[in-house]
Protein backbone atom coordinates (compact mmCIF):
# COMPACT_ATOMS: atom_id res chain seq x y z
CA UNK A 1 0.00 0.00 0.00
CA UNK A 2 2.79 2.42 0.90
CA UNK A 3 4.45 1.71 -2.45
CA UNK A 4 1.18 2.44 -4.27
CA UNK A 5 0.70 5.70 -2.38
CA UNK A 6 4.29 6.73 -3.11
CA UNK A 7 3.83 5.91 -6.79
CA UNK A 8 0.64 7.99 -6.98
CA UNK A 9 2.37 10.89 -5.24
CA UNK A 10 5.30 10.69 -7.66
CA UNK A 11 3.02 10.66 -10.69
CA UNK A 12 1.08 13.63 -9.34
CA UNK A 13 4.30 15.54 -8.81
CA UNK A 14 5.42 14.76 -12.36
CA UNK A 15 2.09 15.67 -13.97
CA UNK A 16 1.82 18.64 -16.33
CA UNK A 17 0.69 22.03 -15.06
CA UNK A 18 -2.57 22.08 -13.14
CA UNK A 19 -5.35 23.58 -15.24
CA UNK A 20 -6.44 25.96 -12.48
CA UNK A 21 -2.97 27.54 -12.20
CA UNK A 22 -2.79 28.01 -15.96
CA UNK A 23 -6.25 29.55 -16.03
CA UNK A 24 -5.43 31.86 -13.11
CA UNK A 25 -2.37 33.09 -15.00
CA UNK A 26 -4.40 33.59 -18.16
CA UNK A 27 -7.08 35.48 -16.24
CA UNK A 28 -4.59 37.67 -14.39
CA UNK A 29 -5.67 36.32 -11.00
CA UNK A 30 -2.02 35.60 -10.22
CA UNK A 31 0.97 37.47 -11.66
CA UNK A 32 3.76 35.40 -10.18
CA UNK A 33 4.49 31.71 -10.54
CA UNK A 34 8.15 31.34 -9.65
CA UNK A 35 9.43 27.78 -9.93
CA UNK A 36 6.05 26.48 -11.06
CA UNK A 37 5.57 23.30 -13.05
CA UNK A 38 4.01 24.58 -16.26
CA UNK A 39 5.05 21.78 -18.59
CA UNK A 40 2.92 21.54 -21.74
CA UNK A 41 0.80 24.48 -20.52
CA UNK A 42 -1.29 26.25 -23.15
CA UNK A 43 -0.89 30.03 -23.08
CA UNK A 44 -1.73 30.56 -26.74
CA UNK A 45 -2.83 34.18 -27.31
CA UNK A 46 -2.74 34.85 -23.54
CA UNK A 47 -1.59 38.19 -22.12
CA UNK A 48 1.01 37.49 -19.43
CA UNK A 49 2.79 40.82 -19.69
CA UNK A 50 4.95 41.47 -16.63
CA UNK A 51 4.25 38.08 -15.05
CA UNK A 52 7.16 36.60 -13.06
CA UNK A 53 7.86 32.99 -14.10
CA UNK A 54 11.40 32.84 -12.75
CA UNK A 55 12.71 29.28 -12.54
CA UNK A 56 9.53 27.73 -13.93
CA UNK A 57 9.52 24.50 -15.94
CA UNK A 58 8.02 25.49 -19.29
CA UNK A 59 9.01 22.38 -21.21
CA UNK A 60 6.74 22.08 -24.23
CA UNK A 61 4.62 25.08 -23.18
CA UNK A 62 2.74 26.96 -25.90
CA UNK A 63 2.93 30.76 -26.07
CA UNK A 64 1.99 31.09 -29.75
CA UNK A 65 0.84 34.68 -30.44
CA UNK A 66 0.88 35.43 -26.70
CA UNK A 67 1.55 38.93 -25.35
CA UNK A 68 4.56 38.61 -23.04
CA UNK A 69 6.01 42.10 -22.90
CA UNK A 70 8.23 42.44 -19.84
CA UNK A 71 7.50 38.89 -18.72
CA UNK A 72 10.26 37.38 -16.56
CA UNK A 73 11.54 34.00 -17.78
CA UNK A 74 14.83 34.11 -15.86
CA UNK A 75 16.35 30.67 -15.18
CA UNK A 76 13.42 28.84 -16.77
CA UNK A 77 13.62 25.50 -18.54
CA UNK A 78 11.74 26.13 -21.78
CA UNK A 79 12.85 23.20 -23.90
CA UNK A 80 10.60 22.84 -26.96
CA UNK A 81 8.49 25.83 -25.87
CA UNK A 82 6.63 27.61 -28.67
CA UNK A 83 6.97 31.41 -28.75
CA UNK A 84 6.15 31.77 -32.44
CA UNK A 85 4.74 35.23 -33.32
CA UNK A 86 4.71 36.17 -29.61
CA UNK A 87 5.17 39.73 -28.34
CA UNK A 88 8.24 39.61 -26.08
CA UNK A 89 9.43 43.21 -25.88
CA UNK A 90 11.79 43.65 -22.91
CA UNK A 91 11.12 40.07 -21.75
CA UNK A 92 13.81 38.61 -19.48
CA UNK A 93 15.33 35.23 -20.39
CA UNK A 94 18.58 35.48 -18.43
CA UNK A 95 20.25 32.07 -18.03
CA UNK A 96 17.19 30.36 -19.53
CA UNK A 97 17.39 26.96 -21.23
CA UNK A 98 15.74 27.54 -24.61
CA UNK A 99 16.87 24.35 -26.31
CA UNK A 100 14.68 23.60 -29.35
CA UNK A 101 12.48 26.61 -28.57
CA UNK A 102 10.54 28.25 -31.39
CA UNK A 103 10.69 32.03 -31.91
CA UNK A 104 9.56 32.35 -35.53
CA UNK A 105 8.55 36.00 -36.18
CA UNK A 106 8.68 36.69 -32.44
CA UNK A 107 9.04 40.32 -31.35
CA UNK A 108 12.05 40.28 -29.00
CA UNK A 109 13.13 43.92 -29.17
CA UNK A 110 14.87 44.88 -25.95
CA UNK A 111 14.68 41.34 -24.58
CA UNK A 112 17.43 40.25 -22.19
CA UNK A 113 18.83 36.79 -23.00
CA UNK A 114 22.11 37.19 -21.16
CA UNK A 115 23.65 33.77 -20.52
CA UNK A 116 20.76 31.93 -22.18
CA UNK A 117 21.19 28.60 -23.99
CA UNK A 118 19.75 28.49 -27.50
CA UNK A 119 20.48 25.11 -29.07
CA UNK A 120 18.53 23.92 -32.11
CA UNK A 121 16.26 26.95 -31.74
CA UNK A 122 14.23 28.40 -34.62
CA UNK A 123 14.35 32.21 -34.78
CA UNK A 124 13.72 33.01 -38.44
CA UNK A 125 12.29 36.48 -39.08
CA UNK A 126 12.40 37.32 -35.37
CA UNK A 127 12.88 40.97 -34.39
CA UNK A 128 15.63 41.44 -31.82
CA UNK A 129 16.48 45.12 -32.07
CA UNK A 130 18.45 46.20 -28.98
CA UNK A 131 18.19 42.70 -27.51
CA UNK A 132 20.93 41.42 -25.21
CA UNK A 133 22.49 37.98 -25.76
CA UNK A 134 25.76 38.70 -24.00
CA UNK A 135 27.59 35.51 -22.97
CA UNK A 136 24.77 33.38 -24.40
CA UNK A 137 25.35 30.00 -26.06
CA UNK A 138 23.80 29.75 -29.53
CA UNK A 139 24.29 26.48 -31.41
CA UNK A 140 22.66 24.79 -34.41
CA UNK A 141 20.17 27.66 -34.54
CA UNK A 142 18.36 29.26 -37.49
CA UNK A 143 18.35 33.07 -37.41
CA UNK A 144 17.78 33.65 -41.11
CA UNK A 145 16.18 37.00 -41.96
CA UNK A 146 16.19 38.05 -38.30
CA UNK A 147 16.48 41.72 -37.34
CA UNK A 148 19.24 41.95 -34.75
CA UNK A 149 20.21 45.62 -35.05
CA UNK A 150 21.88 47.53 -32.21
CA UNK A 151 21.95 44.34 -30.14
CA UNK A 152 24.52 43.22 -27.57
CA UNK A 153 26.03 39.82 -28.39
CA UNK A 154 29.35 40.49 -26.70
CA UNK A 155 31.03 37.31 -25.52
CA UNK A 156 28.44 35.12 -27.21
CA UNK A 157 29.43 31.54 -28.10
CA UNK A 158 28.04 30.68 -31.55
CA UNK A 159 28.46 27.38 -33.38
CA UNK A 160 26.85 26.31 -36.67
CA UNK A 161 24.37 29.18 -36.78
CA UNK A 162 22.66 30.40 -39.95
CA UNK A 163 22.14 34.18 -40.11
CA UNK A 164 21.48 34.63 -43.82
CA UNK A 165 19.87 37.82 -45.17
CA UNK A 166 19.67 39.21 -41.64
CA UNK A 167 20.04 42.74 -40.26
CA UNK A 168 22.97 43.04 -37.85
CA UNK A 169 23.80 46.72 -38.18
CA UNK A 170 25.64 48.27 -35.20
CA UNK A 171 25.41 45.02 -33.23
CA UNK A 172 28.17 44.26 -30.73
CA UNK A 173 29.90 40.88 -31.24
CA UNK A 174 33.06 41.93 -29.40
CA UNK A 175 34.88 39.03 -27.75
CA UNK A 176 32.53 36.51 -29.36
CA UNK A 177 33.60 32.98 -30.32
CA UNK A 178 32.08 32.17 -33.71
CA UNK A 179 32.53 28.91 -35.61
CA UNK A 180 30.77 27.62 -38.72
CA UNK A 181 28.45 30.59 -39.11
CA UNK A 182 26.70 31.56 -42.33
CA UNK A 183 26.35 35.36 -42.36
CA UNK A 184 25.58 35.49 -46.07
CA UNK A 185 24.10 38.57 -47.77
CA UNK A 186 23.40 40.18 -44.42
CA UNK A 187 23.57 43.83 -43.42
CA UNK A 188 26.20 44.09 -40.70
CA UNK A 189 27.35 47.66 -41.36
CA UNK A 190 29.08 49.25 -38.37
CA UNK A 191 28.87 46.02 -36.37
CA UNK A 192 31.60 45.40 -33.80
CA UNK A 193 33.63 42.16 -34.03
CA UNK A 194 36.60 43.51 -32.08
CA UNK A 195 38.64 40.78 -30.37
CA UNK A 196 36.27 38.10 -31.66
CA UNK A 197 37.46 34.64 -32.67
CA UNK A 198 35.96 33.82 -36.08
CA UNK A 199 36.46 30.40 -37.65
CA UNK A 200 34.94 28.71 -40.70
CA UNK A 201 32.49 31.58 -41.12
CA UNK A 202 31.01 32.83 -44.39
CA UNK A 203 30.36 36.57 -44.89
CA UNK A 204 29.76 36.22 -48.65
CA UNK A 205 28.06 39.27 -50.15
CA UNK A 206 27.38 40.93 -46.80
CA UNK A 207 27.47 44.65 -46.06
CA UNK A 208 30.41 45.11 -43.69
CA UNK A 209 31.01 48.81 -44.22
CA UNK A 210 32.80 50.45 -41.27
CA UNK A 211 32.62 47.17 -39.36
CA UNK A 212 35.19 46.85 -36.58
CA UNK A 213 37.41 43.74 -36.68
CA UNK A 214 40.14 45.26 -34.51
CA UNK A 215 42.16 42.54 -32.80
CA UNK A 216 39.96 39.77 -34.19
CA UNK A 217 41.34 36.33 -34.99
CA UNK A 218 39.90 35.20 -38.32
CA UNK A 219 40.72 31.87 -39.93
CA UNK A 220 39.29 29.54 -42.58
CA UNK A 221 36.58 32.09 -43.43
CA UNK A 222 35.22 33.84 -46.53
CA UNK A 223 34.53 37.52 -47.23
CA UNK A 224 34.09 37.19 -50.99
CA UNK A 225 31.96 39.96 -52.52
CA UNK A 226 31.43 41.55 -49.11
CA UNK A 227 31.43 45.35 -48.96
CA UNK A 228 34.20 46.16 -46.49
CA UNK A 229 34.67 49.84 -47.27
CA UNK A 230 35.93 51.58 -44.15
CA UNK A 231 36.20 48.34 -42.16
CA UNK A 232 38.74 48.42 -39.32
CA UNK A 233 41.27 45.57 -39.33
CA UNK A 234 43.95 46.99 -37.02
CA UNK A 235 45.69 44.16 -35.19
CA UNK A 236 43.46 41.52 -36.76
CA UNK A 237 45.04 38.11 -37.40
CA UNK A 238 43.70 36.78 -40.71
CA UNK A 239 44.76 33.36 -41.97
CA UNK A 240 43.54 30.98 -44.66
CA UNK A 241 40.70 33.31 -45.54
CA UNK A 242 39.20 34.62 -48.78
CA UNK A 243 39.22 38.42 -48.79
CA UNK A 244 36.49 40.63 -50.24
CA UNK A 245 38.38 40.96 -53.53
CA UNK A 246 38.49 37.19 -53.95
CA UNK A 247 42.17 36.77 -53.11
CA UNK A 248 43.19 34.10 -50.64
CA UNK A 249 45.28 35.03 -47.63
CA UNK A 250 47.44 32.28 -46.22
Image (cartoon, helix red, strand yellow):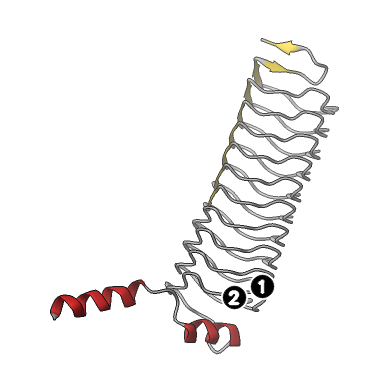
Q: Position of residue 141 (x, y in %)?
A: 61, 45
| 163 relative to 99 in the view: left or right | right
Q: Quadrant of residue 91?
A: bottom right
Q: Earlier in the sequence, mark 1 or mark 2?
A: 2
Q: CA distance from mark 1 to mark 2?
A: 7 Å
The location of residue 192, given as percent across then percent down, is: 71, 38
Q: 225 or 130, which is in the foreground?
A: 225
Q: Are marks 1 and 2 in contact (CB under 8 Å)?
A: yes
**Position of residue 24 measured from the top left corner of the image (x, y, whole percent):** 53, 87
Assign the N terminus to one quadrant of the image: bottom left
Q: Position of residue 137 (x, y in %)?
A: 53, 45
- Disc 2 crowd rating (10 Å Cα; few below 14, some 14-19, many 20+) is many
Element on which disc 1 rests: loop
**194 and 3: which is toward the camera:** 3
Q: Is residue 80 left or right of residue 14?
A: right
Please determine whether, in this image, residue 191 is positioned above or below residue 56. Answer: above
Residue at point 73% right, 49% down?
148
Return the residue at label 2: 43
Q: Looking at the rendered structure, which numbered label has been put on residue 66?
A: 1
Amino acid sequence: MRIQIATIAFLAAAAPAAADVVQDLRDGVITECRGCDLREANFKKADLSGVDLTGADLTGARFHRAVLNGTIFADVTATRANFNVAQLRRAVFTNADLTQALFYEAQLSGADMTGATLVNAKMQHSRMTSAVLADATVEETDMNAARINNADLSGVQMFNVSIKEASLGRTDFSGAAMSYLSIVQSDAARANFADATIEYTDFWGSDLRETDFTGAKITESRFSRANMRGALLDGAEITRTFRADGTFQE
